[in-house]
Amino acid sequence: MFGRFRGAGAPKSGQPRSGRATALLAASATFSVFLIVALVAAWSVFYAPGPQARAGEATIVTLPSGAGVSAIAANLKAAGVIRSTDMFKAAATLTGADRKLRAGEYEVPSRASLRSVVALLVDGKVVRHYVTLPEGWSSAQAVDILMAQPILTGELPDTPEEGSLWPDTYEISRGDTRASVIARMTTAQADNLARLWAARSPRTVVKSPEEAVILASIVEKETAVAAERPRVAAVFSNRLRLGMRLESDPTIVYGVTQGRPLGRGIRRSELDRPTPWNTYQIDGLPPTPIANPGGEALAAVLNPPVSQELFFVADGSGGHAFARTYDEHLANVARWREIERRKAGLPPGSPPPAVPGTSPGVPNADPDAAASPQGVVVPPGAQVIRVPQPAPAQ
């Protein structure tokens, strides 16, 4: 019995088990060391500084909508913001970011780590671009603004109708078409005009939304002081009720430039030139707006304050002096001319400074177009009235 026990090979069988255990332990230790080394390497790659930007302090990368992790990785690699597509895909998968990456335009800082790049795409911190159409700018100027934006695409075959755009700041993305931005401006104008028209006062003189835009565009161009818009709107409303011509300088300019800046004073020949917009020559409103008015100008026209004022002229402070009577207005004009003299360094009572290219003493007149005693001209800074010139001395 004892012989059989010994013959069973107990001592011999123990030795192989010990060897296998040792081998397994050695292999496990080797794998652990390898795994630790691999994790340390991956960790260092994940947090280590990335590539230097090829130009400047950042790289702009655009990731299209619907792109998968592989396409995003290839895009980033091509732009030079990551070193390895495989490492990016592994990092995105292991962190769960592969299901959260967002399309858009990104500004990746130079030498951003892989961790920073992944976090940037998950947070969706895209580059944001804006374009602003200021109140009172024409549709031709709106086209200029959009054509100057290099991130927009496409042409605008036609200039939008005057007054059809809503002045505001719009967010745009790289690759947006200019036509799509115009469509947004047009939609915003229609929506806001409908809202303001629904809240109009019975005091308004305009009979349609279209007339409201026309009159508001003139108000917008007459003053840059927001607080004055209601008073200017009231002046023009009063004049329309009384059958007086609006006699607004900006309408002359629009007839000459079609929405571009004139860049000089109005000439007498332009004052006398009949155009569809020259409210010194036509009764009532012009046929179209002369700019794209904003909400405040439209609200002023649709809800004008109660007022008896019929005139206004520049007051030297950037605003205007308003008057109910023509005599009051002439006194305001005289004060404005005295301010012009002081600014020009001229003695009191001397003729006001002449506009370059115009005749002295006849503001905004052509040199060969002297005013007659019965003639009517625009005094310096006057916005709504033609002031008779005194008879020449005999």
Image (cartoon, rainbow, N blue to C red):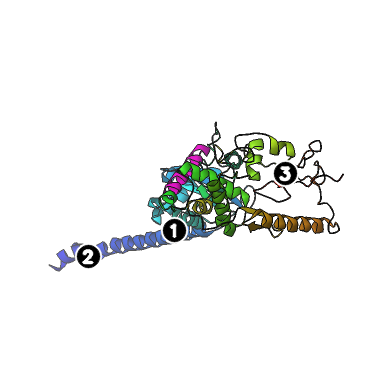
The kind of secondary structure element at disc 2 is: helix
Q: Check disc 2 and report the residue beneath it.
A: 10
**Picture residue at 44% right of the left edge, 61% below the top:** 36
| Residue 223 rendering spot, x and y as whole percentages | 62, 53
Name the main secondary structure of what is drawn in magenta: helix
| Residue 16 rendering spot, x and y as whole percentages | 29, 60
In the rendered image, the residue lying farthest to the bottom is 2
Front-lying residue, 320 or 309: 309
Q: Which of marks 2 and 1 is nearer the N terminus?
A: 2
315 magenta-colored: no
Amino acid at pointer 1: Phe
| Residue 198 rendering spot, x and y as whole percentages | 40, 50
Front-lying residue, 393 or 40: 393
**Picture residue at 53% right of the left edge, 37% below the top:** 161
Q: Check disc 3 and report the residue beneath it.
A: 377
Region rendered in magenta: 176-194
Residue 344 position (above or below residue 371): below
The image quarter containing residue 250 is top right
Disc 3 from disc 1: Cα separation: 94 Å
Q: In which quarter of the image is the C terminus?
A: top right
| Residue contact between numbered discs 3 and 1, judged by CB atoms under 8 Å | no
Amino acid at pointer 2: Ala
Q: How crowded is mark 1: few (under 14 residues within 10 Å), some or many (20 or more)?
A: few
In the rendered image, the residue lying farthest to the left is 1
Q: Check disc 1 and report the residue beneath it.
A: 34
Disc 2 from disc 1: Cα separation: 37 Å
- Residue 103 is tagged as none
Q: Between label 2 and label 1, give the one nearer the viewer.
A: 1
The kind of secondary structure element at disc 1 is: helix
Query: Can see residue 173?
Result: no
